[in-house]
Image: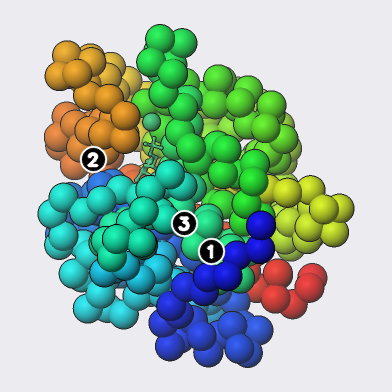
Amino acid sequence: MTPSFTPTLSPEVAEALANGAPVVALESTIITHGMPWPRNLESAREVEADLRAAGAVPATIAVIDGTLHAGLTDPQLEALAQTRNAAKLSRADLAASLARGGTGATTVAATMIGARLAGLGVFATGGIGGVHKGADQSFDISADLQELARTPVTVVAAGAKAILDIPKTLEVLETLGVPVIAYGQDTFPAFWSREAGVAAPLRMDSAAEIAAAHRMRAALGIEGGQLVANPIPSEAEIPRDVMEPAIARATEDAARHGITGKAVTPYLLQRIYELTEGRSLAANRALVRNNAKLAAGIAHALCSGT
Ligand code: PSU
Ligand code: MN
């Protein structure tokens, strides 16, 4: 099915695309559901500034009053960061929200769709959704995994959070044919720590190599994107003995309060921030910035053809 829909581009995104300059997509659920106000706005602004400093234009994807945007102005970013009860839009929700004139933030899955419609090849975020612990009972598997199998966007994340079952998440990605590339190391990173104790399926050591693999998939006609797992900088890492009790407690609380469906991930993130007294948030901000820098390098390589 050929799409007949074009997102509304911010002036700087439109200019960059017209000039063949590097552009990096960013998601908005991390702003509305991933971090508390006002740290969410600070984080969004610092990531955008990092991208510009690295010579790439940021294209934050979001739905505002029924319009799909690729690139937000600073007032739009601020308004979104302040929106309480913003909708969380994944693949299943995007069309209904646009058709009804809604406002909402896009998950990794919906951001990949927006990026593809805007003609963008690379997207930076913090963590992707995946297979939740206890998924054998709950069947809770993020739509992000299917999207990686379908939509040709390279997603740079810091691996998957330990709120997820990481080995099962990697198994599902393998089944779906999604390349999982650890950047600069042989093992898959686990968001707050550089190591998940699991080997990564692929390793690459440069942005140019990642861009070349992205282009080769397109040349081969293989649908879908790539997941790049970029380890958190060592100085921002949080030891496992700090995170594990917080994750266990948050997971128990979610079950006790009967949290299900799309509310699960935001609930766990919020509870973990509370339980670690903000330490997890500082790490989260550092790793998103690190991912933006790598994504800027990939965007440059995609433009220059090197
Ligand atoms: N993991 C994080 N931070 C986030 C998310 C996940 O560490 O902000 C958000 C992303 O937008 C991701 C979504 O796409 O949660 C996954 O939600 P679900 O598990 O409901 O698919
Ligand atoms: Mn889910």
Q: State left or right for residue 178 relative to residue 54.
A: right
Q: Which amino acid lies under the numbered mark 3 shown in the image of this protein?
A: Thr
Percent coordinates x, y for residue 211 in the rendering: 72, 61
From where the camera sits, is residue 42 visible?
Answer: no
Classed neighbour count for the residue bearing mark 3: other residues with Cα under 10 Å, few (<14), some (14–19), many (≥20): many
Q: Quadrant of the C terminus?
A: bottom right
Q: Is the residue marked 1 within 8 Å of ligand 1, measured from its CB?
A: no
Classed neighbour count for the residue bearing mark 1: other residues with Cα under 10 Å, few (<14), some (14–19), many (≥20): many
Q: Which of marks 2 and 1 is nearer the N terminus?
A: 1
State the separation of the CA atoms marked 3 and 1. Answer: 6 Å
Q: Nearer the viewer, mark 3 or mark 2?
A: 3
Q: Earlier in the sequence, mark 3 or mark 2?
A: 3
Q: Which of marks 2 and 1 is in front?
A: 1
Q: Which amino acid lies under the numbered mark 2 shown in the image of this protein?
A: Arg
Determine contact: label 3, label 1, CB under 8 Å. Answer: yes
Classed neighbour count for the residue bearing mark 2: other residues with Cα under 10 Å, few (<14), some (14–19), many (≥20): some
Residue at the spot of label 1: 115
State the separation of the CA atoms marked 3 and 2. Answer: 27 Å
Tell me the residue at 68%/48% (across/down). 224
Residue at the spot of label 3: 111
State the separation of the CA atoms marked 2 and 1. Answer: 31 Å
Q: State left or right for residue 48 relative to residue 23.
A: left
Percent coordinates x, y for residue 286 in the rendering: 37, 53
Circle on res. 279: 2
| Vertical arrangement, residue 189 with respect to residue 102, above or below | above
Q: Is the residue marked 3 within 8 Å of ligand 1, measured from its CB?
A: yes
Q: Is the residue marked 2 within 8 Å of ligand 1, measured from its CB?
A: no
| Vertical arrangement, residue 140 with respect to residue 108, above or below | above
Percent coordinates x, y for residue 254 in the rendering: 22, 21
